[in-house]
Amino acid sequence: KKDKTIMTLTLNQNTENKLENLVSFLRKETAQTDYYAEVVTIAENLGFKVFNTEFKDDNISGYIEVDVDNPESNKICVNKNHCDARKRFTISHEIGRYVLEHLNSDCKKYRKIDYDVNYNSSEEIQANKFAAYLLMPKKMITEVWNQFKDIRITASTFGVSKEACEIRLSNLNLV
């Protein structure tokens, strides 16, 4: 059983720093030194199998399922019909839910693209921020942005959507 020291966080500057430090630690521990994070590798290192799944509702991006009594069955499923950038963000979001301890045992949580009523919950916001930080670390995205000043190049470098890239750059006051 892994020792979990990260508790649910409130959103403030201290939280931002904790999330950045947590992501930095996780990337380092899983040997993710390139701009393009191998999120499936990170998930596997945390004990999750990742599956491309067909959903009846195409608005579902994916889900995480954790079973503390049977950890070999822990999984993250992503919508096989979604583009790679969305799948990568969803996997990162679900990793965030796990690392930030937003899950209970025998828990399954879905992520929808239509942003239902839970979208604005502090846990959803934290998981989205975690995903953005994991995929686009502050130092790395600042470096790439300062070199190219191009959204398409920057998004492509990190394997994210233009929209996710624009939000991250805006939150860093780079655009």
Image (tube, grey):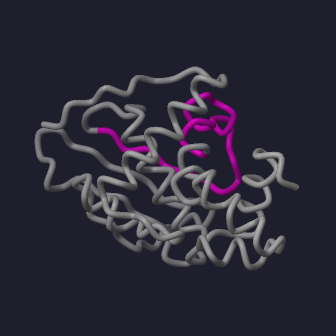
Query: Is residue 116 inside the magenta stretch?
Result: yes
The residue closer to the viewer here, 30 or 65, is 30
Left or right: 25 as drawn, with respect to 160: left
Q: Which of the 4 image quadrants contains residue 27?
A: bottom left
Estimate the x, y position of residue 25 in percent, counting from the top left.
38, 45
The answer to which of 99 and 150 lies nearer the viewer is 150
Which quarter of the figure has residue 149? bottom right
Q: Residue at x 31, y 59 (%)?
A: 30
**Left or right of 79, for residue 83:** right
The residue positioned 36% from the left and 67% from the top of the image is 40
Q: Nearer the viewer, residue 8 or 104?
A: 8
Whether residue 133 appears in magenta in the rendering, the answer is no
The segment highlighted magenta reads: 107-128
Q: Residue at x 57, y 50 (%)?
A: 133
Residue 166: give x, y in percent of width and height.
79, 60
> In the rendered image, which quarter contains the C terminus?
bottom right
**Along the line of sight, the residue nearer the viewer: 96 or 15:** 15
Compared with 167, 146 (above or below) is below
The residue located at (78%, 65%) in the rendering is 146
- State how many labels appear: 0
2 relative to 169 in the view: left or right: left
Residue 130: x and y in percent read: 54, 44
* Vertical comparison of 58 with 5: above or below: below
Q: Position of residue 69 (x, y in %)?
A: 11, 39
